[in-house]
Image (cartoon, rainbow, N blue to C red):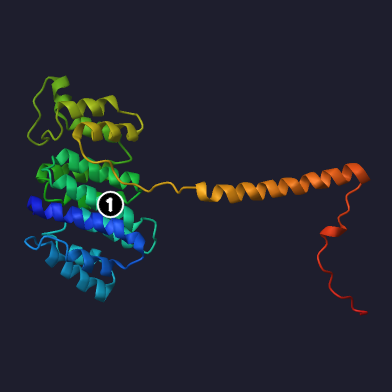
Amino acid sequence: MILDTEEYIEQAYLFRALGERLPENQTVQDLLLQIKNELLSTTRLPMAIDFLLAELKHAGAMASAMARLPHYFAPFQTYVIREAEAESGRFDMRIAVDILRSEAEYRSHAPRPQGLFMFQLECLCRNRLKYDPGLGAIAEDPLFDDAWKEWIYIVRAQIGLIDFAELIYARSAYYWQQRGEEPPAERPVLFDVKEGKIAWANCRKDPVFLFLALQRHLGYPPVPRPKKADQAPNLIPQLQAKIGRLEIRLKLLEEDTKKGAIDITKFYGPQPPSADE
């Protein structure tokens, strides 16, 4: 079900606070307990957090509890947290809660299905999440009607085989405008003329350009993704080690020039005692 705006506003605060406080080396259980007292008590989120806390105590995971609250947490939210809690550890929990924060903020402003779908799909692509379960979770979102669900399952079956821009173009009003025909009842239009033009312009191009263009025109938030590690703190020690190695080589070359041979005995380590001793 689609929640009230205030529920999404409080969800956005929950996930923002989690993302900011996770680096403090506190457990998720302790953080949820803290943030619960900061939330608006007239919403249902504090009760949902109580259920999450109970599941964390017994199972040590949140995703299973979110899956049992489908009337409150959307399937995509549950899937993102499940991937973050997976034993493989490839998907960071901080990125997961940042995704859910951005999504909750977007939901609080009456999003269009086109924008929400593109945001969720781009989250899968940018963070290398699994398409099959991810698109299955997206299809079950309450914002999408039966026509959208049917098309999302088609995308799940054909993504990687057919250019994604072509899939959008074929279900846009621009496609039928170019053909001079009316769309049949079994193929309802899901994207308008502007979105169809963007898809047509990006056919057979890098999908990144399609995502960037649609993000600008649909107005959904930029997708959170892993940040590159800052190498600056390690740069000076690495340079010092390289300079030290260069100095040793220069000394060896100088000795070779002066004596005609390099005395390598000084590089010998302590010798073990012989058997006669």
Residue 74 is situated, as x and y percent measured from the top left of the image, at: 16, 55
Residue sitting at x 21%, y 30%: 169
- Say above or below: 150 vs 211: below
Residue 179 is situated, as x and y percent measured from the top left of the image, at: 15, 21
Residue sitting at x 21%, y 63%: 35
Judge from the rendering whether residue 3 lies leftward or rightward of residue 96; answer left or right. Answer: left
Residue 271 is situated, as x and y percent measured from the top left of the image, at: 84, 69
Residue sitting at x 86%, y 55%: 264
Judge from the rendering whether residue 201 lies leftward or rightward of residue 51; answer left or right. Answer: right
Q: Nearer the viewer, residue 52 or 13?
A: 13
Dot 1: what SS? helix
Q: Is residue 74 visible?
A: no
Q: What amino acid is at disc 1?
A: Asp
Query: What residue is disc 1 on?
Result: 98
The crowding category of the residue bearing disc 1, from other C-alpha atoms within 10 Å (few below 14, some 14 to 19, many at least 20), is many
Residue sitting at x 25%, y 57%: 17
Q: Is residue 66 visible?
A: yes
